[in-house]
Amino acid sequence: MEGSVDSVQELWANGRDPPSRYIVKGEIGPINISSLPPSSPIPVIDLSRLFQPDGADELAKLRSALESWGLFIAVGHGISSDLLDEVLNMSREFFQQPLEEKQKYKSMSDEKNMVMEGYGNDGVESDDMALDWSDRLQLVVQPEDQRTLSLWPSTPSSFRYTLHEFGTKSANVRDMVLRAMAKSLDLKEDTFVNKFDEKASIYARFNYYPPCTRPDLVLGCGAHSDGSVLTILLLEKDVRGLQVYKDGNWVDVFTTLPSSLLVNLGDGMEIMSNGIFTSAVHRVFTNSAKGRLSVVEFCGLDLEKELEPADGLIDEKRPRIFKTVKTKDYLDRLYENYGESKKALYSFKVEA
């Protein structure tokens, strides 16, 4: 997917209505910002309780959330509020720079590692697909020896240090969640985390969704599930936009809890859990009043590692649902079908 389309932020700053390439084919559905619910139905999990002697109820809540929602709001994760605030502040400062400054970090394609790095936006594979109303900065964080530091902004001056720290802390959260998920399934705690070796990937994506004059026709990000094993998101508390598809409806996802994160399961974990856990299909809507930031860390396996259901989750009562597939091959299929919900995941199901 090429990152060669116009800067959406510049389109909005110049007072332009969305060009036809951004218009969604089909109905988005009514979204009235003023009538959104004051509280979110998304489950809240205190990660600090999951391994405590009295943590059985919290562990049961985690399993229920991942079976029914595929995501949860995480508190007690061990990342300081100061660091989270700094991550959002440096993201905001980056996107507030003039276009010529941001273009110093313009996108470059790394086909070998299947990552589009740098500043830009995502193209589409088909003319039938609408472009997303967003700009982004995407960077490899782990493995460290695969970082392209020439694409890591030098302004603000704290950017590189802060992103390194956030990546390190996010890896700790990833491992904590992976161990808890295994425990909730009565597996050995290291069943999932052992898949993540020194070549496991974390790449950061900084998203900016400018205001849009036609939120009834344009999405900030089209409906999809992530190709990661799990995804960690830092959301602004005062601007909504993320929605998850559940039981035939789009449900608003937000959190007002201080220092909270959103943890979202990707297709990789649906495969590894043999379909017990679900990856969340989600999208981002736009609004005409205010722009929105998010910072996302996608956590995945080494591209040469295989995705497959854990042995302990296959038996006569629950046969294997998914085939074994190399991570790289799965991502190839995902990108071919990007924007088509879980089509890539379903193509690796075992035939009945």
Image (cartoon, helix red, strand yellow):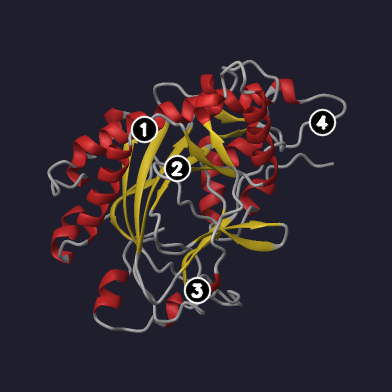
Q: Residue at x 44, y 81 (%)?
A: 214
- Callout 4: few (<14), some (14-19), or many (20+) C-alpha neighbours within 10 Å? few
What residue sits right under mark 4 in the picture?
319
User: Residue 325 sits in which quadrant?
Assistant: top right
Mark 1 or mark 2: whose residue is earlier in sequence:
1
What residue sits right under mark 2 in the picture?
261
Query: Label 2, label 3: how many angstroms apart (C-alpha)?
Result: 24 Å
Give the image location of residue 346, x and y in percent.
69, 48
Residue 166 appears left or right of 53: left
Mark 1 residue type: Ile
Mark 3 residue type: Ser
Tag shown at residue 34 = 3
Mark 4 or mark 2: whose residue is earlier in sequence:
2
Vertically, is 155 above or below 158? below
Give the image location of residue 109, x and y in percent.
32, 50
Mark 2 or mark 3: whose residue is earlier in sequence:
3
**Towards the viewer: 111 or 62:** 62
Q: Secondary structure at mark 3?
A: helix
Quadrant assignment for the C terminus = top right
Quadrant assignment for the N terminus = bottom left
Q: Can residue 94 be seen in the rendering of this structure?
A: yes
Q: Are marks 1 and 2 in contact (CB under 8 Å)?
A: yes
- Callout 1: few (<14), some (14-19), or many (20+) C-alpha neighbours within 10 Å? some
Query: Label 3, label 4: how many angstroms apart (C-alpha)?
Result: 46 Å
